[in-house]
Amino acid sequence: MKQGKCWAVVALCICLLLAVTAAGCISQPAEETEITVFAAASLTGALTELGEEFEKANPGIHVVYNFAGSQTLKTQILEGADCDLYISANSKQFDPIAEAGLIEDKKILLQNKLGIAVVKGNPLGIKNLGDLAGSGVELAVGDESVPFGQYTRDIISNYQDDGHAGYVDAFMGNVVTQVDAVDKVKSYLTLGEADASIVYVSDISKADKESLDILEIPDQYNVIADYPYGILRNTENKKAVETFEVFVTGPAGSALLLDYGFSPISA
């Protein structure tokens, strides 16, 4: 009888121990995985919103962004910065990382076009590329070291080659500042320190349209910018990064990118 009581006590203790252990397991919060995404500055608005939607759908994964000019991101990665996924605004700033063996696969996320950004209401009546070389027009443009600055130079060269001799010199003669990020261009425009610029169409967000207008550049002069991306080989969060990739390239991500003026490859 005493032996039976002892076994009963032992069994009760085991049950209590299991219950406490189970309760402890349930109360422990799930471990959060953090992924670091290096992305071209022109993606700031779209990816910030997309990241918020992604985290709602995947509460165990937190996305940390590093937005900057692609040339800056390239240098940081080559110098050993902690990065899980890299999205560049052009191949020139992406390929050196792939050639160094740091990227698994090069893929194209989306495409982008450029347009002419002017102050809301377009007080100077700028209609086309030709008007940007007119007397009294002050321009803020991208530095040639950044993708949108290089694309600007490609566009004005294309325009000059189409029978507009002297255009490039006239255009550059109207440049009052050269910057390394589109946000700086927008500041010059909204503060009245410049009249126009050539930027990515996607750079003029819904909020920006309260103070800026965007004019189309004909395809014969325009540049179609590919945005390559890739997962870093040394990532320790590959599964989480791949989950993010699927979301960005899937229906929800593509719809949001389209809304921001991009042309997703998967769309």
Image (spheres, rainbow, N blue to C red):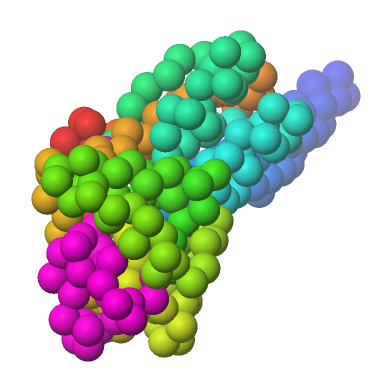
Left or right: 176, with 211 as reference point: right
Q: Which residue is at 58% across, 40% downward?
A: 71
Q: Quadrant of residue 213?
A: bottom left
**Residue 98 to residue 161: above or below:** above
Q: Which residue is at 41% across, 60% downward?
A: 172
Q: Nearer the viewer, residue 256 or 150?
A: 150
Q: Quadrant of residue 15?
A: top right
Instruction: Look at the image and tell me whether residue 30 can be seen.
Output: no
Q: Nearer the viewer, residue 115 or 86?
A: 115
**x, y percent for residue 21:** 73, 36
Q: Nearer the viewer, residue 180 or 54?
A: 180
**Residue 163 to residue 181: above or below:** above
**x, y percent for residue 62:** 56, 47
Taking the magenta stretch, the answer to whether it contains residue 116 is: yes
Instruction: Give the number of marks.
Output: 0
Q: Quadrant of residue 24?
A: top right
Q: Which residue is at 39% across, 76% downward?
A: 138
Q: Which residue is at 47% across, 76% downward?
A: 187
In magenta, the rendered stretch is 111-139
Q: What is the quadrant of the N terminus in the image?
A: top right
Instruction: Look at the image and tell me whether residue 165 can be seen.
Output: yes
**x, y percent for residue 2:** 87, 24
Q: What is the quadrant of the C terminus in the image?
A: top left
Q: Nearer the viewer, residue 31 or 260?
A: 260
